[in-house]
């Protein structure tokens, strides 16, 4: 635009536009084009755009750089944290501000700019490149970058002299394109062969190219890719729903999982959001899961603020208290030192690192631990498994302080010991669990388990302890020595509706609706408290079917690999 008629070259676009408009004097009758132009120039929105442009020009001089790329997430995080606790008036005001649509829009615009999500769409590749693409290993990559560096470092292979991509910077142009990978061999940049160039010359070519940049690449071999693949597998100990997680940088990119799922973590580059895939899932794309550190941090925070759901749901806690009462009423005693459901939980249940494990020839077999909710009758089930194959399966013989009955033999039904030696054994932590029944003490010792395993048998243990003391018992058994496989047996409890319709069930008809409700709650409570350590849930319909199912599970434990904590295998 020429500089005449009073326009100052230094004037901003907005001012220039205003001056131009004021100097247009179209004759309404003769000059339709000028009239149209004046109308366009007088448009308010155009004036606003020009103003924005001028403001941005001013800031361009300072070359501002974003401090973070996800201000919206930070704001949501903050809002969530504010929400979860009592608020002062200024915190309430901040929460209100953070929730206003305008501020949200500004932060979202900020993130779009910071993440440079406005890259142009690339033109199609020139046709003459197609022949080269026929060569199976060559890949032509076009990506867009501005003045920033490519975001990749290179090294020269000492043996072949090839230029290899050594590292990809997260969030850089190469990373954002998703087309360049560590181990790729770089052949050409914008048509220039680089094999004979020095690394600093290559870096210069790379950093100087702007806009669309074309790289000719020989992709890393599949072997290298496999080596790079992470071998970290985690068992999830909690349920995760990305759509309920306000802190995630992108809910759609989250990986929903359930307690017990095995996750393969493919990237832990980010300290907060790991990338993972679900084992057995046909979706090959990795998605985001919270890191252990982050999950622990927010659980710790929620616990501090009193919004953390305790180890048991309120319903289960109520049910547990009721169950204690019922058992106390029925039995002459309750276990010494039961862990109450309200006692503080020290470890958060997040993930457990696992690996595939199969018992090898000559190795001790894995310990089989049976836990059962009310009505499961696991003792009966265990006895049947052993009775059908006593050479293969053995039972950990419990200790008791009660009198031996005439038909009983020492070391077969029980080890009969005195109360004082029982108490001494308790002091020496010899029992995995113990309890009191009609003024007599009963308990299962670690030694009795070892003696079965030493005879090369598969040892079956059922926990007699109160449900609340299971955690302690399971903890003492979850070691490399025993490698326990935990089976949770729960009876199938028909719904009241089905019962009214007269559906068949193995449960006696004398069982009342209250009994059924108690069984349902017992199973729920067991699942709530210990479900995360369970390897197999057996829903018991009728005894014969349950026995058959348990036997086939036990065969699979011996003959197939299963996921176990890495600490049981790596020494
Ligand atoms: P009995 O004296 O009739 O053989 O057994 C009485 C009760 O003692 C059984 O109902 C069973 O629940 C309990 N009991 C048997 N063995 C053990 C054990 O090892 N630990 C605990 N806590 N209770 C046991």
Image (spheres, helix red, strand yellow):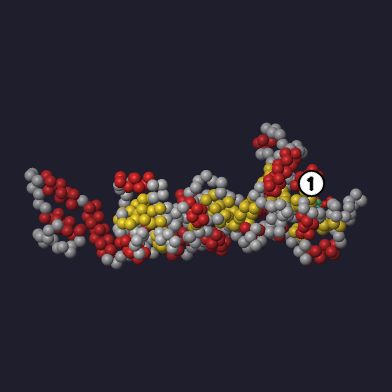
Instruction: Decide if residue 184 is in sight here.
Output: yes
Is residue 443 or residue 525 the one in the foreground? 443
Q: Secondary structure at mark 1?
A: helix
Q: Position of residue 490 (x, y in %)?
A: 70, 45
Mark 1, ligand 1, within 8 Å: the answer is no
Instruction: Decide if residue 468 is in sight here.
Output: no
Name the quarter where the N terminus is drawn.
bottom left
Q: Quadrant of residue 193?
A: bottom left
Q: Quadrant of residue 54?
A: bottom left
In percent of the image, x 66 and y 61: which residue is there? 343
In percent of the image, x 37 and y 47: which residue is there? 133
In percent of the image, x 44 and y 65: which residue is there? 90
In percent of the image, x 71 and y 52: which residue is there? 361
Q: Position of residue 307 (x, y in %)?
A: 56, 58
The residue where tag 1 is placed is 386
Left or right: residue 33 compared with residue 289? left
Q: Position of residue 373 (x, y in %)?
A: 71, 48
Left or right: residue 450 compared with residue 21? right
- Neighbourhood count class around disc 1 (C-alpha, 10 Å): few under 14, some 14–19, many 20 upward: some
Is residue 211 or residue 320 the one in the foreground? 211
Task: Name the residue at the front extreme.
Answer: 159
Name the quarter where the C terminus is drawn.
bottom right
Placement of 420 over or under 498, stated as above or below: below
Placement of 390 over or under 56, stated as above or below: above
Q: Quadrant of residue 107?
A: bottom left
Say how many tags the image has. Answer: 1
């Amino acid at each position: 635009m020429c500089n005449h008629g009073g326009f100052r070259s230094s004037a901003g676009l907005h001012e220039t536009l205003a001056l131009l408009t004021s100097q247009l004097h179209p004759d309404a009758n003769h000059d339709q084009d000028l009239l149209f132009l004046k109308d366009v120039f007088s448009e308010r929105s155009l004036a606003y755009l020009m103003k924005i442009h001028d403001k941005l020009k001013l800031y361009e001089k300072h070359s501002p750089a974003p401090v973070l790329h996800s201000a919206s997430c930070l704001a949501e995080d903050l809002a969530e944290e504010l929400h979860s606790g009592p608020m002062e008036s200024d915190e309430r005001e901040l929460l209100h501000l953070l929730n206003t649509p305008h501020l949200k829009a500004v932060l979202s615009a900020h993130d779009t700019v910071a993440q440079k999500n406005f890259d142009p769409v690339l033109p199609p590749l020139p046709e003459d490149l197609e022949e080269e693409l026929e060569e199976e290993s060559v890949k032509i990559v076009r990506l867009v970058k501005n003045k920033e560096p490519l975001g990749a470092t290179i090294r020269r292979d000492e043996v072949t002299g090839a230029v290899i991509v050594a590292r990809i910077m997260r969030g850089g142009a190469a990373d954002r394109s998703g087309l360049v990978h560590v181990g790729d061999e770089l052949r050409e940049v914008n048509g220039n062969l680089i094999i004979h160039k020095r690394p600093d010359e290559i870096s210069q070519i790379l950093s100087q190219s702007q806009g669309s940049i074309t790289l000719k690449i020989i992709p890393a071999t599949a072997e290298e890719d496999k080596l790079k693949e992470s071998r970290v597998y985690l068992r999830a100990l909690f349920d995760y729903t990305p759509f309920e997680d306000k802190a995630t940088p992108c809910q759609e990119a989250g990986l929903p999982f359930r307690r017990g799922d095995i996750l393969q973590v493919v990237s832990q580059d980010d300290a907060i959001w790991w990338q993972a895939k679900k084992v057995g899932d046909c979706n090959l794309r990795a998605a985001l899961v919270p890191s252990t550190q982050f999950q622990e941090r927010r659980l710790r925070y929620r616990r501090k603020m009193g919004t953390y759901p305790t180890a048991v749901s309120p319903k289960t806690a109520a049910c547990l208290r009721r169950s204690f009462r019922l058992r106390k009423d029925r039995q002459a005693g309750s276990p010494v030192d039961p862990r109450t459901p309200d006692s503080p939980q020290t470890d958060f249940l997040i993930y457990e690192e696992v690996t595939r494990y199969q018992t090898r020839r000559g190795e001790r077999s894995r310990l089989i631990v049976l836990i059962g909710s009310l009505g499961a009758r696991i003792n009966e089930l265990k006895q049947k498994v052993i009775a059908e194959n006593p050479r293969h399966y053995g039972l950990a013989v419990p200790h008791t302080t009660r009198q031996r009955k005439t038909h009983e033999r020492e070391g077969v039904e029980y080890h009969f010991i005195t109360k004082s030696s029982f108490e001494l054994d308790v002091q020496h932590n010899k029992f995995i669990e113990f309890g009191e029944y009609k003024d007599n003490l009963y308990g299962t010792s670690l030694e009795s388990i070892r003696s079965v395993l030493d005879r090369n048998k598969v040892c079956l243990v059922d926990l007699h302890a109160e449900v609340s003391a299971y955690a302690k018992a399971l903890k003492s058994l979850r070691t490399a020595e025993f490698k326990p496989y935990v089976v949770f047996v729960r009876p199938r409890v028909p719904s009241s509706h089905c019962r009214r319709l007269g559906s068949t069930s193995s449960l006696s008809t004398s069982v009342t609706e209250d009994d059924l409700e108690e069984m349902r709650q017992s199973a729920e409570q067991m699942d709530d408290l210990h479900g995360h350590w369970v390897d197999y849930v057996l829903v018991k319909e009728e005894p014969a079917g349950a026995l058959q199912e348990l036997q086939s599970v036990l065969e699979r434990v011996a003959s197939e690999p299963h996921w176990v904590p890495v600490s049981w295998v790596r020494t």
